[in-house]
Image (cartoon, rainbow, N blue to C red):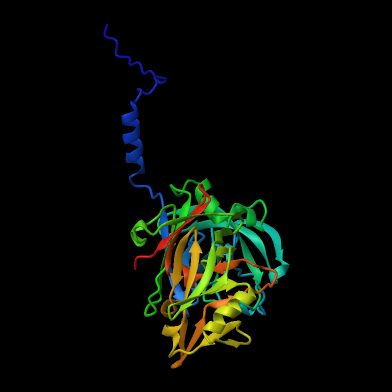
Amino acid sequence: MIDLSFRFDLYKSEPKLSRRAKRSLRNALRSNVWTNDSVDLVKFMNSEYYGEIKIGSPAQTFNVMFDTTWADSWLPSSHCAWTEVVCRIHNRYDGSKSSSYIPNGRLINMSYISMEGMLSTDTFHLAHVKLDNQTFMEATRIPMMPFIQYKSDGIIGLAFESKAIFKDVTPFFYNLIKQEVIKENIFTFYMNRDATTTRAGKVIFGATDRKHMKPGTNTTLSVIEKSFWKIEIDSIAASKNKTTYPISGKCEAIFDSSSNVIEGPAENITAINYMMNAVYVPGINKYAVNCREYAKLPDIHFVLNGNDFSIQSKYYVQRLTVENIEACFSPFVPNADSRIKYWSLGGAFMMEFYTEFDLDREVVNVGQTVF
């Protein structure tokens, strides 16, 4: 009699792989997996930098500022009242149109800036990767100033988690790390200073791009306060006609990736603008300069960890043309709150210098941008 039965050992263990074989297998599995992603930045009126992000299923598109001075993220809500002008003139998130929307409903009141809203959760989409279950605020009340003048709809915060206002909510960048969407716990900015285009560079999540940094110019700066990306400045000076004028001794500064301005203590800002013969313009908190003389204005030097990072007026002056009328403004403005003594280095600085924000090492790498 012939035995036609078959025996299958269902519990047989997998063959053991060598370390080399395991490494090859991992690399093969990762070959089609994105380990970083980037967002193209656009500049508006040479004063605001934003990029596109999509949220929900199907995706709703928003222009957002990737802001190193905020830790939380928010967008205008479809639930805002018809009287909310800022909300109404921007793209508004509508959870009822998204199958991946998860209601939260916790109310948020940021009374210090007159903003209110509620928390919601949905899927965020970058160009090639997605981030599941990201909680953000649907803003139902947004103050007129400064948001009425913004082209962007909302903010994606990139400050340290300790600065987050929304408690028990994982901020956007930390969620990228938690969900292993990116390979390295770092994000990078490089910006375009070309005034003839609205293209403003990129923000890269999970990687660096050192081809945009001039070799030999990198300076590593330790973060001295893990809320903002705050670093120490050795000194600040202005130079004109081969003469250098001290502006400030040792001080502190944060990076601001969302705006063009450089803010500082009023007495220091006044000294710089005095050298520029700038005239204060009430209502917009800016100083106007002579457009015909802007190229002759002083260079401003920030000494960081012993290295001189200087910005030139032909790049830092904000030049605007509206209906054939040209206006030029100094990027240097006083801190809105006189109690704040640190500086804020916005686009007028970051357009000149490629910048890496390294969360693991708690440092910022800064070098001359290659355009």
- Asked whether residue 100 is in view, the answer is no
Residue in the picture at 63% in, 72% down: 265
Residue 360 shown left or right of residue 37 in the figure:
right
Q: Quadrant of residue 104?
A: bottom right
Q: Position of residue 297 (x, y in %)?
A: 46, 82
345 and 9: which is toward the camera: 345
From what the image shows, is residue 196 above or below residue 290?
above
Q: Residue furthest top?
A: 1
Residue in the picture at 62% in, 59% down: 120
Numbered-mark total: 0
Q: Position of residue 86 (x, y in %)?
A: 61, 77
Q: Quadrant of residue 99?
A: bottom right
Residue in the picture at 48% in, 61% down: 58
From what the image shows, is residue 246 above or below residue 74?
below
From what the image shows, is residue 84 above or below residue 23?
below
Q: Position of residue 102 (x, y in %)?
A: 60, 55
Q: Residue furthest bottom?
A: 324
327 and 295: which is toward the camera: 295
20 and 159: which is toward the camera: 159
Q: Position of residue 109 (x, y in %)?
A: 72, 65
Quadrant for the N terminus in the image: top left
Residue 299 shown left or right of residue 115 in the figure:
left
Q: Quadrant of residue 98?
A: bottom right
Quadrant for the C terminus in the image: bottom left
214 and 144: which is toward the camera: 214
